[in-house]
Image (cartoon, rainbow, N blue to C red):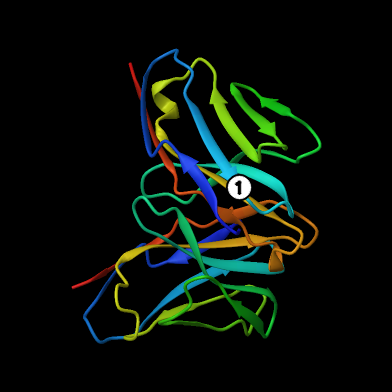
Amino acid sequence: DGGITQSPKYLFRKEGQNVTLSCEQNLNHDAMYWYRQDPGQGLRLIYYSQIVNDFQKGDIAEGYSVSREKKESFPLTVTSAQKNPTAFYLCATRDRGSTEAFFGQGTRLTVV
Amino acid sequence: QQQVKQSPQSLIVQKGGIPIINCAYENTAFDYFPWYQQFPGKGPALLIAIRPDVSEKKEGRFTISFNKSAKQFSLHIMDSQPGDSATYFCAASGRGNQGGKLIFGQGTELSVKP
């Protein structure tokens, strides 16, 4: 079964805790992206990576961190510095030379 | 200049109607304009996309109209069905947009009544 796997589907975090969201792909795509979705605000870019061991901040990177040690994996850590982390998080990939982005099924993070 | 503005925020139509969703952009470096469809609890999926060298593109019941001079584009859904009920996002990317990242509109929640 190919594609993009985000896990877990639902995640609950206590205030003050860091939490890591997983994104794994077997599409052999070079670029990977993390978006945050809030009602009425569309999708906002958190971080993106075009190649292994390199990544750039998006529009709302504060309070988040990422790594890209393998082509297949682009985990996102939501740190305690993120003031309002409750949201739906989406991972996407894109092949080099292509314009089409493919999305995972998302992780819904709730701070309790 | 990086924004894409989408309207309306929500839309209700009867089955068979033609909902129209509009988007506007400022950055003339954008050269790729996709529309994504998202069902509740799922990730967005590419529906249809257009480049600015054409004014219209049709795929099945979905049509994009593109007005380069006005920097606007819209999605029309012909003969809409209850199964089309979803959230629709327009987006843009292009030259000068590092990493091929997509800039998304705010989304339109479409409800098609039986």
Tell me where residue B6 appears, x and y as whole percent. 49, 42
Q: Chain of mark 1?
A: B
As drawn, which residue projects farthest toward the left?
Answer: A112
Q: Secondary structure at mark 1?
A: strand
Q: Nearer the viewer, residue A42 or B86?
A: A42
Q: Using the image, determine if residue B11 lies above or below residue A71.
A: above
* Numbered-mark total: 1
Q: Position of residue B65 (x, y in %)?
A: 65, 29
Q: Which residue is mark 1?
A: B25
Q: x, y percentage for residue A102?
A: 60, 54
Residue type at mark 1? Tyr
Residue A82 horizontal side relative to residue B61, left or right = left
* Residue placed furthest toward the front: B69
Residue at (29, 73) in percent of width and height? A84
Q: Is residue A47 visible?
A: yes
Residue closest to the eye, B68 or B84: B68
In the shown orientation, is residue A11 left or right of residue A74? left
Q: Position of residue A97 (x, y in %)?
A: 80, 59
Q: Quadrant of residue A24?
A: bottom right
Residue at the location (29% across, 67% down)? A86
Please give left or right for residue B35 compared with residue A31 in the image: left
Q: Assess disc 1: are there few (<14), some (14-19) or many (≥20) residues with their C-alpha within 10 Å of its C-alpha.
A: many
Left or right position of B89 against A99? left
- In this rendering, the answer to whether B31 lies above or below A109 is above
Residue, x 47% and y 23% (percent of image)? Answer: B19
Image vertical order of residue B50 relative to residue A16, above or below? above
Say if residue A29 shows up in the picture: no
The C terminus of chain B appears in which quarter of the rendering?
Answer: top left
Q: Residue at x 69, y 81 (%)?
A: A52
